[in-house]
Image (cartoon, grey):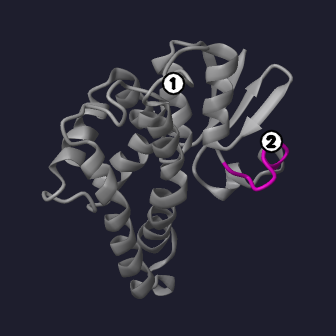
């Protein structure tokens, strides 16, 4: 049985979304996004840094969203939500799948820290402004890639879960402007998927 160790408003939402898209049964260990849960001895035994998501699959334990997604697709859903290696869209799939953590999530993390997590007296407006600019620039190629397409490679894939989650977060943070109509529509399209809506509501 799969067990997802989960906290709301975190990257763990990607794995919840993935498992629901695949209709895979799983148990949910829901924790608060707070040190009392995430930094507890019990959870640090699952993840050395006290982070989420963590996925247990019987004797297997794995963390990092990209690694979990690849693991689930390979072990539990071969041939689903990922183009074949010889498919023309496979290189683009890989690119956008990894673009999320490489380029989009770092400035999102900074924005969240300096708007939500730190007390007001410790927030750095300069760092916040720089992160907002960086995120806007990082989203520009995604806006272009979505021209005339519903999803990043045409069909819905796990890249849309990995990067799409970050695009939804960017929209909610106010970085996706009206000058990014493709991204606006993309975020709405993703949230119209029942699995995505459920993941964000969890």
Is disc 2 surrounded by few (<14), some (14 to 19) or many (20+) residues within 10 Å? many
Which quarter of the figure is the N terminus placed in?
top right
* Position of residue 45 in the picture relative to residue 134 (left or right): right
Residue at left offset 51%, top offset 64%: 106
Quarter-of-image position of residue 187: top left
Examine the rendered structure and indicate whether residue 45 appears above or below residue 126: above
Residue at left offset 67%, top offset 38%: 67
- Magenta residues, as a range? 44-51
* Position of residue 168 in the picture relative to residue 109 (left or right): left
Q: Tell me the residue that label 1 is attached to.
A: 82
The answer to whether residue 141 is visible is yes
Is disc 1 surrounded by few (<14), some (14 to 19) or many (20+) residues within 10 Å? many
Q: In this orientation, which residue lies closer to the viewer: 31 or 149? A: 149
Q: Is residue 46 covered in magenta?
A: yes
Residue at left offset 47%, top offset 36%: 93
Q: In this orientation, which residue lies closer to the viewer: 130 or 78? A: 78
Residue 46 bears which disc, if any? Answer: 2
Residue at left offset 67%, top offset 44%: 64
The answer to whether residue 53 is visible is no
Majority SS type along the magenta span: loop
**Is label 2 or label 1 in front?**
1
Q: In this orientation, which residue lies closer to the viewer: 12 or 139? A: 139
**Residues marked 2 and 1 touching at CB (< 8 Å):** no
Q: Is residue 114 covered in magenta?
A: no
Residue 98 bears which disc, if any? Answer: none
Name the N-terminal-most of marks 2 and 1: 2
Picture coordinates of residue 126, whole percent (x, y)? 40, 87
Classify mark 2: helix, strand or loop.
Answer: loop
Picture coordinates of residue 158, whole percent (x, y)? 48, 30
């Amino acid at each position: 049985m799969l067990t997802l160790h989960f906290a709301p408003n975190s990257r763990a939402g990607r794995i919840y979304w993935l498992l629901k898209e695949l209709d895979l049964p799983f148990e949910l260990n829901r924790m608060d996004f707070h040190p009392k849960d995430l930094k507890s001895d019990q959870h640090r035994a699952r993840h050395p840094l006290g982070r989420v998501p963590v996925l247990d699959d019987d004797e297997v334990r794995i963390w990092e969203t990209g690694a979990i997604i690849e693991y689930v697709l390979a072990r539990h859903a071969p041939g689903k939500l990922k183009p074949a290696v010889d498919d023309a869209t496979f290189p683009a799939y890989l690119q956008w799948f990894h673009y999320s953590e490489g380029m989009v999530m770092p400035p999102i993390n900074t924005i969240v820290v300096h708007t939500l997590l730190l007390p007001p007296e410790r927030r750095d407006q300069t760092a916040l402004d720089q992160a907002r600019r960086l995120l806007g620039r990082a989203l520009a190629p995604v806006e272009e890639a979505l021209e005339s397409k519903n999803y990043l490679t045409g069909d819905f894939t796990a890249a849309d879960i990995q990067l799409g989650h970050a695009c939804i977060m960017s929209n909610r943070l106010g970085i996706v402007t009206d000058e990014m109509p493709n991204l606006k529509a993309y975020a709405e399209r993703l949230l119209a998927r029942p699995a995505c809506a459920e993941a964000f509501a969890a």
